[in-house]
Amino acid sequence: MEEDSAQPYTLKEWAGALALVALLIAAAMVATAISGYVADVLGLSGEFARWTLFFVAMLILGSAFYRPFWVLAFGLGALAALVTMAAYIVHFQILPAFGFAVLALALGAISTVLLP
């Protein structure tokens, strides 16, 4: 809807807003479940620890929609594949080294395409 328009919101705009709210609620529920599980596994008690873990989980979930996060993830994946390839070459295992070279090229290409 435009700012100066007197027309009401369309059904598509309402559906989009409702979907966004549902996504935020689902992300909060997932973050709550993750923080509770991690707090139980680590033996942490108290509300401060659970809230801290909740906000950390929300940051992690929120970064999934942030392009530089994916560029960094695919770039580090390509770097890890290159290091693994070098280790296989040193140990004269050529076939796995070739596979990791292909993986590094693919991840590097994806990382380059994702750059803004």
Image (tube, helix red, strand yellow):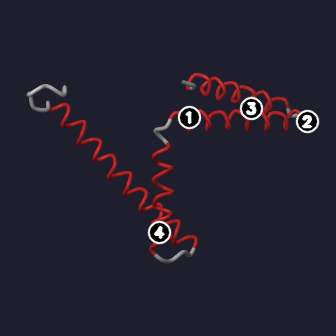
In the structure shown, which secondary structural element does the residue marked by tag 1 occupy? helix
* Quadrant the C terminus occupies: top right
- Nearer the observer: mark 3 or 1; the answer is 1
Q: CA distance from mark 3 to mark 4?
A: 40 Å
Asked if marks 2 and 3 touch (Cβ < 8 Å), the reply is no
Q: Amino acid at mark 1?
A: Pro
* Quadrant the N terminus occupies: top left
20 left or right, relative to 66: left
Instruction: Tell me: residue 90, above or below residue 40.
Output: above
Give x and y (percent) for residue 87: 85, 38
Q: Which residue is mark 1?
A: 68
Q: Amino acid at mark 2?
A: Val
Q: CA distance from mark 3 to mark 1?
A: 24 Å
Observer-nearest of 81 and 9: 9
Disc number for residue 100 = 3
- Nearer the observer: mark 3 or 4; the answer is 4
Q: Amino acid at mark 3?
A: Phe
Residue in the picture at 46% in, 38% down = 65
Instruction: Tell me: residue 58, above or below residue 82.
Output: below
Q: Which residue is mark 4?
A: 50
